[in-house]
Amino acid sequence: MAKKGVVAVLDRPGGKFELKEYPLPDPAPGTVLVKQELGGVCGTDIHMYHGRLPGITYPICLGHEFMGRIAALGKGVTTDFLGKPVKEGDRVIVVPGVGCGKCYWCQIAKTPTCCEEGFAYGFFSDGDKKYHFTGGFADHVYLHHPGTAILKTELPLEIAILAEPISVADHAVSRSNIHVGDTVVIQGSGAVGLTCQVLAKLAGATKIIHIGGPTSFRIDMAKEFGADITINVAEVQDAEERIKMVKDNTIKGMGADVVFECTGVPRAVREGLDMLRRSGTFVEVGHFTDGGEVSLNPFIHMCNKNVNLQGSWGGELEGFVRELPVLEKREFPFEKLITHKLPLRRLNDIMQVPDKGYIFDGRESLKITVSSELA
């Protein structure tokens, strides 16, 4: 394959994305070359841009939320993970994380995201000259690991691109021990928070209290996605007042049965624990990078409350498979989460969005995507 492709390479933390041209690889047996159609910009990408994920080396091609059409198939690849026949031109969702399938974490602990031999697209240094197209912020992605899972889909781009965030939500909700009739608090109005909210309701939660913002648009999205009570942090700025509002809407003022912390803001952790009832479950799903420390009182926040504390790291193949039918059912207006579709050359501007109040190009943002098809 003599053609060339483009990769957005970040030179260093806080640096600049440069569009670099490299020859496209001919897929080896068991591998796939995908023409990127859409890549989601995750909060983790922005944190990695700022250098907040230990162990990452630069230069790097970011982007772990991506999907596209098959450009070329390596020998032996005839079906997707679920056995559906695939051919060039088919639209596929890519599961970015790949475990070895043989280690303790993959076989015994059933936690492939902890696999020490694992690999994840979008976290791979561009310094390795053998592969360049290793992240979604490029016009092609080379699925060079033979264990990579793809899922064929006919979903529109604006829905299919949410497969990775909803897999993260699936992992979090599966660890939450939700029961029918529970009151659940969602902290955070990003894609993960809103998809956690959807899955919590599908899992049996009867009352959803959504704490988020800071824009009215995000709160409106929370309402449209099923929140029963919303609290905008821009309007209710005192944490103690927010805690009281939550407790006032729970049985005997005891607090929520389950709290999902999806903000990635350290101070939200203590606040969320204060909203939780005794023997409730707190799921930490927002801190995929090192955002800093938080002060807790082990007696008050853990032992005395008999708290069930769950950490949730990433999304797994199981979540992609289980939640793809949820996306395909089209019960919720998932496409409304996509507020921007921009070319790769705007990545340097996109990384500044959180510092600008989530307003981008004069519009409120929620999930920003990049496309290799745009000029």
Image: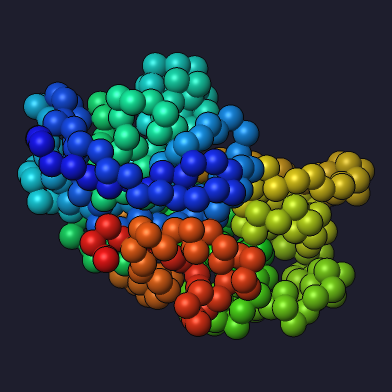
Q: Nearer the viewer, residue 53 or 257?
A: 53
Give percent across and percent down for residue 332: 38, 72
Q: Is residue 113 in sight in this rendering?
A: yes
Residue 63's place in the image compared with 345, above or below, is above
Seen from this angle, which residue lies furthest top?
A: 103
255 or 316: nearer the eye? 316
At a point 48% along the width and 58% down the height, the residue shown is 348
The location of residue 147, given as percent across then percent down, is 29, 28
Q: Is residue 284 above or below residue 274?
A: above
What residue sits 49% from the left and 81% below the top? 363
Near-viewer residue (21 or 187) = 21
Who's the residue at 80% across and 75% down the image? 237
Q: Seen in the image, is 268 located left or right of residue 28?
A: right
Image check: 292 left or right of 100?
right
User: In x, y percent, where is residue 102?
Assistant: 39, 16
Q: Quadrant of the N terminus?
A: top left
Total labels drawn: 0
User: Which of the 4 image quarters holds residue 186?
Assistant: bottom right
**Quick check: 223 above or below 314?**
below
| Residue at 10% in and 51% down | 89
Residue 17 located left or right of residue 238:
left
For the C terminus, the image quarter is bottom left
The answer to whether 370 appears left or right of 265 in the picture is left
On the question of residue 44 being in view, the answer is: no
